[in-house]
Amino acid sequence: MEKAVGSMLSQIFENLVCLIRKFIFCVPNHIAFIMDGNRRYAKKRGLMEGVGHKVGFLALMSMLRCCHELGVRYVTVYAFSIDNFKRSPKEVQSLMELMQEKIDDLIKEESIVNCFGLRIYFIGNLKLLSEPVRLAAEKAMLATAKNSKAVLCICVAYTSTNEIVNAVKESIEEKWDEFCVLNASGAGYGLIKLGGSEGDEREQLIKLIDIEKHMYMAVAPEPDIIIRTSGEIRLSNFLLWQSAVCYLYSPSVLWPEVGFHHFLWVILNFQRNHSYLYKKWKQQ
């Protein structure tokens, strides 16, 4: 009986989305979520510590389904900031264990990830993760490497400033290696003589494209929308480089409470503002 009701509700949802899709002429290509409010949700309802994050995982599955039904190709979620490591050791350990459990759930054969053909990328300084979680993340990326219908980027041990510093560092190292190869072959003639004047050459040693290709988020285009729940109107060091012209939406609802009507509202508002956002993007 329960299964039949679930199947009926799923069919109703799919029919509703099909109807809505007819009125949406501009589906965002990439939506990012700052999943804020899990701890407050648990406290608000007098639940045990950690339960809010478990309910939050169900909310993520719901949002992934919404994105899939509307044809959103890229989804990014802010799961764990580098700053979150400053929380109590007990809480960090609990979150790491929960993360490992949910990563394993993501790659089960019957999971949403495999049903929807999602390729998973874990974004951030993965060396900071505990070994079991890091290995689980690597396993999930390998297991979904052949999925090609959509992409799910999970930001863990991540901050945007760390991403930028790392990209600059890798760009410099790559450029230095190139110069060393040229000089060793006799084709370099020294670092300065590769082009124009000394001043011009220094300005062009590292270009924007060099940094962008080394960003953790190079696997996805810039987000069209960033949704942060719990009513907080700040990015908290998330996708600062990539969010110059994206649409920001901050509903007051806590992350575990987010639902389809919140998702639909932001899509419709994005559609209304699309021409302006596209113009700003073209100007850049």
Image (cartoon, grey):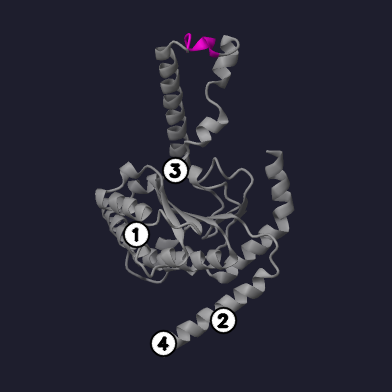
Q: Position of residue 72 (x, y in %)?
A: 57, 60
Q: Which residues are magenta?
A: 188-194
Name which residue type carries label 2.
Ile
Number of marks in picture: 4
Q: What secondary structure is found at the residue carrying circle 2?
A: helix
**In 3D space, how far apart are the residues under numbered discs 4 and 2 (Cα atoms)?**
15 Å
Q: Are marks 4 and 1 in contact (CB under 8 Å)?
A: no
Residue type, numbered disc 3: Thr
Q: Residue at x 39, y 13 (%)?
A: 184
Give the numbered dot on residue 258: none
**142 vs 172, nearest the viewer:** 142
Q: Which residue is the site of mark 3? A: 159
Instruction: Give the mark nearest the N terminus, 1 or 3.
Output: 1
Find disc 1 in the rendering and name its residue: 103
- Residue at 27% across / 48% down in the picture? 130
Q: Are marks 2 and 1 in contact (CB under 8 Å)?
A: no
Q: Position of residue 152 (x, y in %)?
A: 47, 56
